[in-house]
Each structure stands twice: as C-alpha cells, then as structure tokens.
Image (cartoon, rainbow, N blue to C red):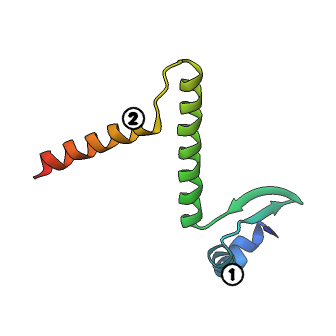
Amino acid sequence: MSEIRPVSDLRNHFSEISRTVHETREPVILTRNGYGDMVVISYEEYQNIQYDLMVMRELRAAELESESTTERSTHDEVMSDIRSKIQAVSNTNV
C-alpha cells in the first residue's frame, strides 16, 4: 500500500523516501495542505509503467484494427510468416 506523507518530507527526508520507493517498489504520495500533490516512484518503476502503457496502446491499436477488417490468420500462418522474416534477417547478417 502506498505511503502518504506531507510534501515537506521530500526536502526533510529525501533519503528515506528514496529508500522506501526503491525497496518497496511502491509509490509515496506527497500531500500539500492535506490534498494529494505529487507521487514519487523509482526510475525503474517509472520505466515499467511506461512499458506497460506502450503495450496497452499497441494492444488497443490491434483491437481497433481487428474491428475494421475481416482478414484473419491462423496460428500456423502467423508463425510461418515470423519464421520467414527471421530467416531473411539471418541471411542478410551472414
């Protein structure tokens, strides 16, 4: 569960907040005047969130594309196409 702290703790207890977000991989929510103001997360966690968002965007784009066409491929067709592309790249790198 996220830790909630006043924003002044960022200045007064930076090392402790940094250690918390790295060790727990949970965000620390900072408040100002009793209301949420900022969220502190580790850079690694930020990268994970960005990656997840990118995957979600790609999945959504694929869903939209699948709704706009009736073209479908079997698993075997997809795998064959992927293998062909890998083989083509392998041949050009030799």
Tell which of 34 and 58 is nearer to you. 58
Tell which of 2 and 14 is nearer to you. 2
Q: In the rendered view, would you say 5 is above or below 80?
A: below
What's the distance in space between the residues labelled 1 and 2, CA to CA? 54 Å
Q: In the rendered view, would you say 53 is above or below 14?
A: above
Tell which of 72 and 62 is nearer to you. 72
Under mark 2, the amino acid is: Glu
Closest to the camera, between mark 1 and mark 2, is 2
Residue 54 as seen in the image, left or right of residue 93: right
The residue at the far right in this view is 34
Query: Which one is earlier in the sequence, the residue at label 1 or at label 2?
Result: 1
Tell which of 1 and 77 is nearer to you. 77
Packing grade of label 1 (10 A; few <14, some 14-19, many >=20) is: few
Residue 4 as seen in the image, left or right of residue 38: right
> Residue 39, located in which quarter of the rendered image?
bottom right
Residue at the image point whose x is 34% and y is 39% from the top: 80
Kindly state the secondary structure of the residue where label 2 is placed. helix
Numbered tag placed on residue 62 in the rendering: none
Q: Which residue is mark 1?
A: 16
Residue at the image point whose x is 77% and y is 64% from the top: 30
Q: Position of residue 49 (x, y in %)?
A: 60, 55
Residue 58 as seen in the image, left or right of residue 35: left
Q: If the image is split into quadrants, where does the N terminus sit?
A: bottom right
> Residue 13, located in which quarter of the rendered image?
bottom right
Kindly state the secondary structure of the residue where label 1 is placed. helix
Under mark 1, the amino acid is: Glu
Numbered tag placed on residue 77 in the rendering: 2
Q: Are marks 1 and 2 in contact (CB under 8 Å)?
A: no
Q: Position of residue 6 (x, y in %)?
A: 81, 68
Packing grade of label 2 (10 A; few <14, some 14-19, many >=20) is: few
